[in-house]
């Protein structure tokens, strides 16, 4: 192919990000390497994953920029944003590997932006787990020039891959998160719906860890447990959605009572590492929600000290000893 010629067009699809369009352009025009089409258009898949150079993709496919930007991640002040929501840290984008739903690709062979979300592991449309392997057994990547196979094989086809159904609770938290981004049918979780998505996901993971491990005096991260991040998010989401936060706190307090180095209970020590997290909760409505739960639980078990009131209450609280 003449590398100075404008490539053949593709029409941007629903939920398709700019870097997904790039791989479809490579496939449509018969490129053997992503390097070649990146040179032609002057933009790489990695740049497009950060929202850089989207206008070049829009020009190549004769499209307005805004519809493509709507499904493309953008770097804003060090955080990635998509459809008005910030995501970063553990809730970032899988940028070194490619994932997909074989049934989605079988229906229409293009990439969806939510395939890249690290906190999503299932497809809301088909109720299946996302995969990252080609049918030949190798990993899919952003060096591939075909949507449905890796660059290392000639006859691969992800639509031949067997898919598995995830546990219903895991699928539900994914459906809730994707609904926040305008994908699929929304699931309501009133206590979480008022929070920014980034904050809500953080809360879900923290409560999931608390529910899975109970009382622990030291800070715990997802990587410290032998439970998958997806399972922890599922546990946290269900505990909050079903109103079981009090039961989780009861379990943590029971662990405190069984601990060997037990001191007189305060909010600072009776709930382990939760107090450290609780002190730093932002924005205020998040802190208020958990303050209500923690203070109510504590008041049913021991006298709340003036120190606890000063250190943990985000707003007016009952006087010491009141439930």
Image: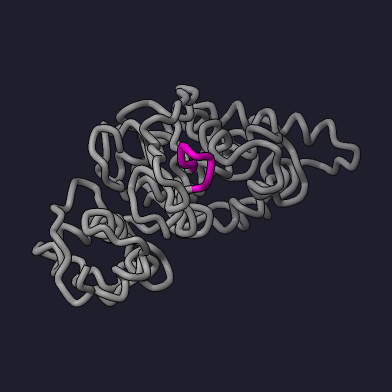
Above or below — where is 78 with respect to 28? Answer: below
In the rendered image, which quarter contains the C terminus? Answer: top right
* Residue span colored magenta: 133-139
Q: How is the image coloured?
A: one colour
Residue 291's x, y, as percent? 53, 45
The number of numbered badges drawn on the structure is 0
Q: Residue at 76%, 50% (x, y): give it.
A: 218
Say whether residue 253 is left or right of residue 34: right
Tell me, yes or no, whether the highlighted magenta stretch contains residue 287. Answer: no
Nearer to me, 266 or 96: 96
Closest to the observer: 251 or 204?
204
Q: Is residue 89 above or below residue 233?
A: below
Q: Let me know if residue 240 appears in the view.
A: yes
Residue 257 placement (x, y as % from top left): 81, 32
Q: Is residue 83 visible?
A: no
Specify the principal SS of the magenta part: loop
Give the residue at x 45% y 32%.
Answer: 129
Q: Looking at the image, which residue sits at the far right?
A: 260
x then y, percent, for residue 283: 43, 57
Instruction: State the quadrant of the N terminus.
Output: bottom left
Residue 261 image-quadrant placement: top right
Q: Nearer the viewer, residue 298 or 145?
A: 145
Q: Please state the horizontal and vertical placement of residue 25, each as a whole percent of the image.
A: 23, 58
Quarter occupied by residue 68: bottom left
| Residue at screen point 90% across, 38% down | 260
Residue 306 vertical placement versus 73 (above, below): above
Residue 128 lies left or right of residue 305; in this view the side is: left
Apparent side of residue 156 relative to residue 204 in the rendered image (left or right): left
Judging depth in this view, the residue of 263 and 72 nearest the camera is 72
């Amino acid at each position: 192919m003449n590398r100075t010629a404008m490539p053949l067009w593709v029409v941007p699809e629903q939920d398709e990000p700019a870097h997904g369009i790039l791989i479809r352009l490579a496939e449509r025009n018969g490129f053997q390497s992503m390097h070649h089409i990146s040179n032609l258009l002057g933009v790489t898949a990695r740049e497009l994953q950060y929202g850089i150079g989207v206008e070049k993709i829009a020009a190549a496919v004769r499209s307005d920029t805004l519809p493509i930007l709507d499904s493309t991640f953008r770097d804003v002040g060090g955080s990635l944003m998509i459809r008005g929501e910030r995501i970063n840290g553990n809730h970032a984008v899988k940028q070194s590997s490619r994932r997909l739903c074989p049934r989605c690709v079988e229906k229409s062979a293009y990439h969806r932006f939510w395939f890249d979300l690290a906190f999503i592991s299932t497809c809301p449309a088909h109720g299946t787990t996302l995969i990252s392997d080609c049918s030949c057994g190798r990993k899919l990547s952003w060096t591939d020039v075909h949507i449905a196979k890796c660059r290392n094989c000639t006859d691969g086809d992800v639509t031949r891959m067997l898919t598995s159904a995830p546990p219903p609770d895991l699928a539900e938290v994914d459906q809730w998160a994707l609904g926040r981004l305008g994908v699929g049918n929304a699931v309501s979780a009133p206590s979480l719906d008022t929070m920014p998505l980034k904050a809500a996901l953080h809360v879900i993971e923290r409560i999931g860890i608390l529910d899975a491990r109970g009382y622990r005096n030291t800070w715990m991260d997802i990587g410290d447990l032998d439970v998958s991040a997806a399972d922890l998010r599922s546990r946290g989401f269900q505990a909050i959605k079903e109103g079981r936060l009090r039961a989780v706190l009861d379990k943590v307090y029971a662990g405190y009572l069984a601990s060997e180095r037990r001191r007189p209970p305060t909010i600072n020590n009776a709930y382990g590492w939760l107090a450290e997290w609780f002190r730093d909760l932002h924005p205020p409505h998040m802190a208020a929600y958990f303050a209500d739960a923690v203070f109510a639980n504590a008041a049913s078990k021991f006298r709340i000290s003036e120190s606890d009131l000063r250190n943990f209450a985000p707003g007016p609280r009952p006087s010491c000893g009141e439930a």
